[in-house]
């Protein structure tokens, strides 16, 4: 019996010595190389580390130095100066589930190709790590990351797991091309839902804070978001800048506050922007709201050729549409003010009162093309219930027929400027007059126009102006039907007889001053409303010589004239 006891003690001592030897050897570089080779040869992963460290003062922790880990034939998933593996009694039944995994001073690259990873942890801790997630919905790159994920249970297609608490900070971060620094994130993952209870960062020389949730369908609910002193330059157009929002299934904004922001793109810019938006949901190019509000002001706004100074915009959203409470702005040296409603039913913009004063506006070179182009899908009609013009200067620099009107005043009511997404004068009445005007280098004084339009006809009851030596008076009717039949009657008393020739009409055989009478009718072409085909008579009387000449007019007008037969 004594022999058997001594034998058992001897065997036990040998086992202990062997374990001790393995324990000592595995903490050497040679031992680390052997373990790395075995893992790389017998699994689908490659592992390399320089040394393993274990101390009896912290018996549940194993520390690996200078670790590289990844799938066979793939870029490394993990490169770290130190990896601290916290063990627990769970290793007996689940060897690959750690109590804690702490990664220090390295880089962690997570992508769908790297998941699932062979291990899990009750907590993943990062200390001064770089974090990259290429080829994912969120293209994320972060440096100096410190924080944790609890628990960490990566699976195929989901490197963060389905359920976890997140608390992390980063010295710098780039998310989908947008850089930020001093980032703080707190939240949780619950299946397909993500809750970010706290998000904060310095971005574009400013800062933002807020909280948000992503639902199971992929839509986002932003409870609060505040942006302060943002200074952002983008190489994208305004439409492309907001395009990522359109890719979301939905975006529900509870409260968005922007203070003193400056944003700039290739053909757009906004300076000193203050914005407050409440209770608005954007869904696939449309929006919904029960009691939303938008208040916005800036010192300057540029979009293409549109340049506004000190714009102020206040609106309320409802299921019926948008109530425009206030829009005011300095524009082209003058001021614009209006209020009204955009109605979802009918996609109609109805402006209660429009005031335009002191403008010095040059029409864009392609304004005739813009006039013919259809309006966007969301704007079917435009109605000015009341409008007033005061002391405006309007200029057209078209070299074939330049014109300008000085000190243009006017008023009108129920003027329908668009119908079925097409510009025009489709209803209402208007009266316009100016102090002076020039039409194709012919100066006139006190030009005036009065019109009334309905569904079938535009009636110009008064069209008059004083020339250098006389007066021109005219009336006209324009059909609203597709044929656009037009009739014009013009009388000139004591005017230069070559006056109409400057506007494209045939030259008369007499000169001097006299009386002119013109009657014409024609058809405005649908694609080119300023090129009518006309028929009519032009007669003139020389006041000094009492000579009469009459010209029969037949033909098609050239560009840019009210009626210019050739």
Image: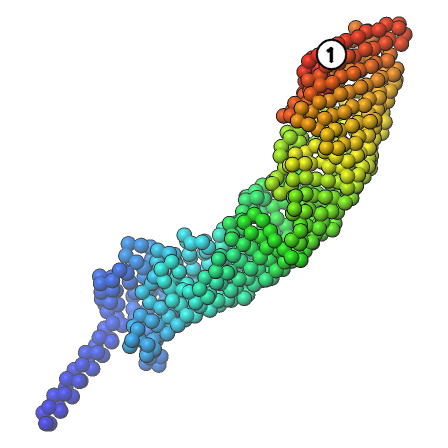
The vertical placement of 553 against 444, above or below, is: above
Seen as rendered, the residue at the extreme bottom is 2
Q: Which residue is drawn at 89% across and 5% down?
A: 545
- Which quadrant does the C terminus fall into? top right
Q: Position of residue 252 (x, y in %)?
A: 58, 57
The vertical placement of 537 against 424, above or below, is: above
Q: Position of residue 132 (x, y in %)?
A: 42, 57
Q: Is residue 398 visible?
A: no
The vertical placement of 497 against 70, above or below, is: above
Query: Considering depth in this image, is 520 or 494 the residue closer to the camera?
Result: 520
Q: Where is residue 535 in the image (x, y as percent from the top left)?
A: 72, 14
Relative side of 128 to 44, left or right: right
- Number of callouts: 1
Q: In which quarter of the image is residue 61?
A: bottom left
Query: Considering depth in this image, is 225 or 370 the residue closer to the camera?
Result: 370
Q: Which residue is drawn at 79% across and 41% down?
A: 386
- Which quadrant does the N terminus fall into? bottom left
Q: In which quarter of the image is residue 512?
A: top right
Q: Where is residue 179 in the image (x, y as percent from the top left)?
A: 52, 54
Relative side of 329 to 167, left or right: right
Q: Residue at x 49, y 55 (%)?
A: 175
Q: What element carries label 1?
A: strand
Q: Residue at x 17, y 85 (%)?
A: 12
Relative side of 269 to 15, left or right: right
Q: Can residue 157 be seen in this view?
A: yes
Q: Residues within 10 Å of mark 1 (few under 14, many from 20)?
A: many
Q: Name the residue carrying label 1.
A: 553
Q: In which quarter of the image is residue 516?
A: top right
């Amino acid at each position: 019996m004594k022999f058997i006891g001594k034998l058992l003690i001897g065997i036990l001592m040998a086992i202990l010595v062997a374990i001790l030897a393995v324990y000592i050897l595995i903490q050497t570089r040679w031992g680390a190389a052997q373990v790395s080779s075995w893992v790389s040869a017998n699994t689908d992963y490659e592992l390399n580390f320089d040394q393993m460290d274990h101390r009896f003062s912290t018996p549940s922790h194993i520390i690996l130095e200078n670790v590289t880990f990844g799938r066979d034939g793939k870029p490394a998933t993990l490169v770290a100066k130190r990896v601290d593996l916290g063990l627990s009694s769970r290793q007996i039944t689940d060897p690959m589930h750690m109590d804690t995994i702490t990664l220090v001073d390295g880089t962690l690259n997570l992508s769908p190709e790297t998941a699932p990873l062979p291990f899990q942890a009750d907590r993943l801790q990062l200390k001064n790590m770089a974090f990259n997630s290429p080829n994912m919905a969120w293209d994320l790159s972060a440096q100096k990351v410190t924080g944790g994920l609890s628990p960490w249970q990566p699976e195929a297609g989901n490197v963060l797991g389905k359920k976890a608490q997140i608390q992390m900070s980063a010295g710098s971060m780039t998310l989908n091309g947008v850089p930020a620094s001093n980032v703080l994130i707190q939240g949780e993952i619950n299946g397909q839902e993500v809750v970010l209870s706290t998000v904060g960062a310095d971005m574009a020389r400013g800062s933002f804070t807020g909280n948000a949730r992503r639902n199971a369908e992929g839509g986002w609910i932003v409870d609060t978001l505040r942006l302060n002193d943002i200074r952002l330059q983008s190489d994208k157009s305004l439409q492309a800048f907001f395009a990522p929002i359109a890719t979301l299934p939905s975006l529900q904004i509870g409260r968005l506050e922007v203070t003193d922001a400056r944003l700039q793109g290739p053909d757009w810019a906004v300076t000193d922007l203050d914005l407050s938006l409440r209770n608005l949901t954007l869904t696939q190019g449309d929006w919904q709201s029960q009691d939303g509000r938008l208040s916005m002001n800036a010192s300057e706004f540029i979009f293409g050729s549109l340049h506004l100074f000190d714009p102020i915009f206040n609106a309320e959203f409802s299921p019926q549409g948008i109530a425009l409470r206030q829009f005011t702005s300095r524009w082209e040296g003058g001021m614009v003010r209006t209020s009204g409603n955009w109605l979802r039913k009918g996609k109609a913009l109805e402006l209660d009162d429009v005031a335009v004063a002191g403008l010095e506006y040059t029409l864009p070179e392609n304004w005739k093309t813009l006039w013919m182009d259809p309006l966007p899908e969301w704007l079917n009609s435009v109605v000015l219930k009341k409008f007033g013009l005061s002391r405006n200067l309007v200029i057209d620099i078209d070299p074939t027929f330049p014109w300008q009107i000085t000190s243009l005043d006017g008023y009108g009511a129920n003027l329908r400027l668009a119908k079925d997404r097409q510009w025009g004068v489709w209803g209402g009445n208007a009266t316009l007059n100016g102090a002076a005007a020039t039409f194709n280098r012919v100066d006139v004084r006190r030009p005036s126009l009065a019109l009334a339009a309905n569904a079938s006809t535009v009636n110009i009851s008064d069209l008059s102006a004083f020339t250098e030596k006389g007066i021109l008076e005219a009336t006209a009717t324009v059909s609203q039907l597709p044929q656009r039949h037009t009739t014009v009657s013009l009388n000139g008393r004591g005017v230069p007889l070559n006056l109409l020739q400057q506007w494209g009409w045939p030259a008369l055989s007499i000169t001097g001053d006299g009386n002119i009478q013109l009657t014409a009718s024609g058809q405005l072409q649908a694609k080119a409303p300023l090129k009518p085909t006309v028929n009519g008579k032009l007669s003139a009387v020389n006041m000094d010589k009492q000579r009469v000449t009459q010209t029969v007019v037949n033909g098609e007008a050239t560009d840019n004239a009210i009626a210019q037969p050739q």
